[in-house]
Image (cartoon, rainbow, N blue to C red):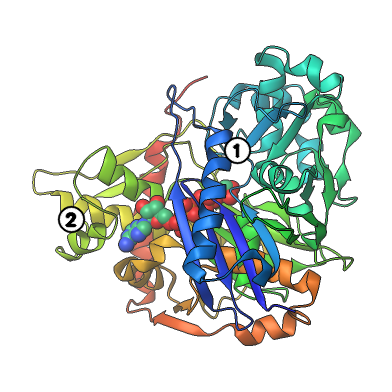
Amino acid sequence: MSEYVGAIDQGTTSTRFMVFDHAGAEVGRHQLEHEQILPQAGWVEHDAAEVWARTQDVVRGGLEAAGITAADLAAVGITNQRETTVVWDRRTGEPYGNAIVWQDTRTDGIVKQLERDGHGDLIRQRTGLPPAAYFAGGKLKWILDNVDGVRADAEAGHALFGTMDTWVIWNLTGEHLTDVTNASRTMLMDLETLDWDDELLGLFGVPRQMLPEIRSSSEVYGNTRADGPFGAEVPVAGDLGDQHAALVGQACFDAGGLKNTYGTGNFLVLNTGTEIVRSQNGLITTVAYRLGDQPAAYALEGSIAVTGSAIQWLRDQLGIIDDAAESETLAASVDDTGGVAFVPAFSGLFAPYWRSDARGAIVGLSRFNTKAHLARAALEAICHQSADVVEAMVADAGLTLPELKVDGGVTLNSLCMQIQADVLGVPVVRPQVAETTALGAAYAAGLAVGVWSGTDELVENWAEGARWEPATDAEQRKTARAQWAKAVERTLDWVSE
Ligand SMILES: Nc1ncnc2c1ncn2[C@@H]1O[C@H](COP(=O)(O)OP(=O)(O)O)[C@@H](O)[C@H]1O
Ligand SMILES: O=P(O)(O)OC[C@H](O)CO
């Protein structure tokens, strides 16, 4: 059997296809961006047809870059930006409109109403999620209520719902399914039964027949169509949300395993084993992964909406840097932020605050300050937001943190990683393969078809690539954290309903 495994990573800003070998090393990749559609303040959309077109392009390009054909692949795994919601017509394959992206806040009113109607505790208890615009259920309700013809077509069995994994797998194989990790982000799945919950479906007014079947994260779901981008039948055998895939790619299989992924947003995921831990400190309870017929592993997650995208904002909206990497050289040109704090609460604040009324703020400005201070404050914001979540995890799970495993685009910024070690007071460690999201999807697929015999083999593949040691004392950390808390306070209660 071939020992190459492919992975499609359908992310917020881009889609990539990567090929890995048995050692978990990259053999080739191709990556393409898609348009961010911003029709009005707070709305973020993707054209699902464009995303599928880019997916096909990157598969073809990635196979070419790896110098292989689909016949050399033992399996393919799918991983995806989570919560982003699309509804399409099964008869034509056409979406009814743009996908509503996880960052979109238009459904704030829907979830607030559910809370006011007294359903908040039921949602929290059954799904592990606080009612928030972030999750897919409200987005699906919005589409059913606002897009012409969708509700009637859903009731007639024509309209299908999916997160982006479901959309990609349906286009690749014709199967309509999702996995437990993606389903756990909808506010429609019972965390304990791992099935759609009729009471929640009733609350959101969602016809059950439009929902995909919920499967494990690692099993053969079907074969790619020979007339699709692979040009042959390849088993699609892994499906998990990108943050869950990164946990697998980082080989965090034991309870207590934690990773922090730095991308558009930051997502810290702590494996809690087969135990469902309920947060008292603003974290989400979610499914970590479910490998075949093994029991599901659960996790506590701290989701942060804006981190790498604050760097994009410095580049695209303010124009103070030409590319993301320049944020490091500019920030390194000053010793500190010159008293400035930047809280990029562009979509409100996610974990651990869950304050949709917050908006971004730059505080502490004086005439002395320059763009370099602002760039440095943006990097500090990434690290302090991560520290907010780590502190919540320590409080919830009694976590002792020997070091922090990191991955994602922002970890290329060495200054940012040094600041992270300084803020937390523990070493920060990046693996040799920094593309842990795609790697985790490949692992899930490869486990299902026997490329890897079990998770022990994956743990052996993990190797340290870079390490940053803290260079601060406890007093400095305490002062910095207190200053950050003051800045966060300034962003609250800005937007009124
Ligand atoms: N050197 C860098 N310094 C700071 N941020 C960076 C750097 N390189 C990339 N980024 C940020 O990383 C993000 C992309 O990371 P990636 O892991 O590809 O994210 P995603 O999967 O969310 O698209 C972008 O938001 C970009 O601004
Ligand atoms: O595509 P990313 O890496 O920004 O990840 C998005 C998250 O899955 C949203 O929950």
Residue under the point 42% across and 61% down: 409
Image location (x, y in percent) of residue 44? 49, 31
Disc 2 marks which residue? 338
Question: Which residue is drawn at the image coordinates 64% and 41% (left, top)?
Answer: 83
Question: Which image quadrant: the N terminus?
Answer: bottom right
Q: Residues within 10 Å of mark 2 (few under 14, many from 20)?
A: some
Instruction: Give the x, y percent position of residue 323.
Output: 25, 53
Going from N to C along the chain, the mark reached first, 1 or 2, is 1
Mark 2 vs ligand 1: CB below 8 Å? no
Name the residue at 68% across, 62% down: 76
Give the foreground label among 1 and 2: 1
**Would you say residue 178 is visible in this rendering?**
yes
The residue pinned by badge 1 equals: 134
User: Which of the two residues, 303 or 6, is positioned nearer the viewer here?
Assistant: 6
Using the rendered view, name the quadrant where residue 150 is placed: top right
Q: Could you tell me if residue 128 is visible in this image? A: no
Say which amino acid is labelled 1: Tyr
Image check: 131 left or right of 377? right
Tell me the kind of residue under disc 2: Gly
Secondary-structure class at tag 1: loop
